Image (cartoon, grey):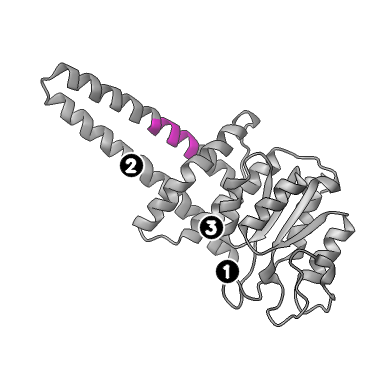
Amino acid sequence: MENININRDKRLFLCLMLIIVIAISMITFTLFFIIRNSGINLYKIIIKTIILLTIIIIVFLLFLSYLLARLINNKKVPNIFITFLERSVKLIYPVMIFLSSLVNIDKDSIRRVFSQINNKIVILKEPKLNPEDILVIAPHCLQKSFCKHKITGNIDNCHKCGACDISDLIDVCNKYNVKLEIVTGGTLARRLIKDYKPRGIIAIACERDLSSGILDVKKVPVIAITNERPEGPCKNTCVNTRNVEDSIKLFMRRL
């Protein structure tokens, strides 16, 4: 079922790209129709300039859509286009979120694919980091709400009872000597990133927080891992610690 949902999300993401291209193409056609029926030379010059710009945007979006389709479907993308792809996706993402609201598409579907694209780009960059360069950031909602031992700001307060995934997460990070921090939100996460100055981040959060974090952290590669929410958002969430371990090994090139 999860694979079906992922494939559906990918199709929705690419469909939104196509909708943007079609919308801009219609604008270009309309402007072309206006210019043909206008007798004012200055007006024609302005319209021609706008048409030229929209054609450039269409070509850009078509090429971006081609690269995204290859990346999403695990096909090779030339290294020369990786930086272009990374910057372009971050540029177009807010437009896609806005458009998803207009056409009534679940925003989390777009956010999931955006995070997946980001992770694939990080992999293509082939980072090779030392353990001290890696920071794992996890949300406090991974801890059970009934637990009396609050670990935000001090992971050593965890009694490792095994009721939640925090204990396994600590074990994984200790295994590779990687720093782990539990945060209450984006503000604390940004402060920790500023303090630690990591060269690689593994972020665990919901789709919205992950996509916001990826956009905020501009110069540090982020591997995004979506948490599981069996009891709804922000309460007793879970994480697949195997994905966290694989991400650490990826950053350290131990896969």
Q: Secondary structure at mark 2?
A: helix
Q: Residue at x 66, y 64 (%)?
A: 184
**Residue at x 66% of width, y 39% of height:** 219
**Circle nearer the N terminus (1, 3):** 1
| The residue stretch that appears in magenta | 57-65
Element type at mark 1: loop
Picture quadrant where residue 102 is located? bottom left
The quarter of the rendered structure image containing the N terminus is bottom right
Residue 183: x %, y % from top left: 69, 62
The residue pinned by badge 1 equals 1
Closer to us: 145 or 74: 145
Answer left or right for 224 relative to 159.
left
Q: Position of residue 130 (x, y in %)?
A: 85, 44
For this orientation, the residue located farthest to the bottom is: 146
Which residue in the protein does label 2 denote?
22
- Residue 192 at what x, y percent from top left? 72, 52
Q: Is residue 8 visible?
A: no
Cα gap from disc 1 to disc 3, whole angstroms:
10 Å
- Main secondary structure found in the magenta portion: helix
Residue at which label 3 appears = 7
Q: Looking at the image, is 107 positioned above or below residue 66?
A: below
Task: Determine whether 226 is above or below 93 in the image.
Answer: below
Residue at 43% from the left image edge and 49% from the top image edge: 96
Near mark 2 (Cα within 10 A), the count class, few <14, some 14-19 or many ≥20, is few
Q: Earlier in the sequence, mark 3 or mark 2?
A: 3
Q: Residue at 75% x, 73% y: name it.
A: 150
Q: Label 3 neighbourhood size at 10 Å, few (<14), some (14-19), many (20+)?
A: some
Residue 65 x, y percent position in the rendering: 48, 40
- N-term-proximal mark, 2 vs 1: 1
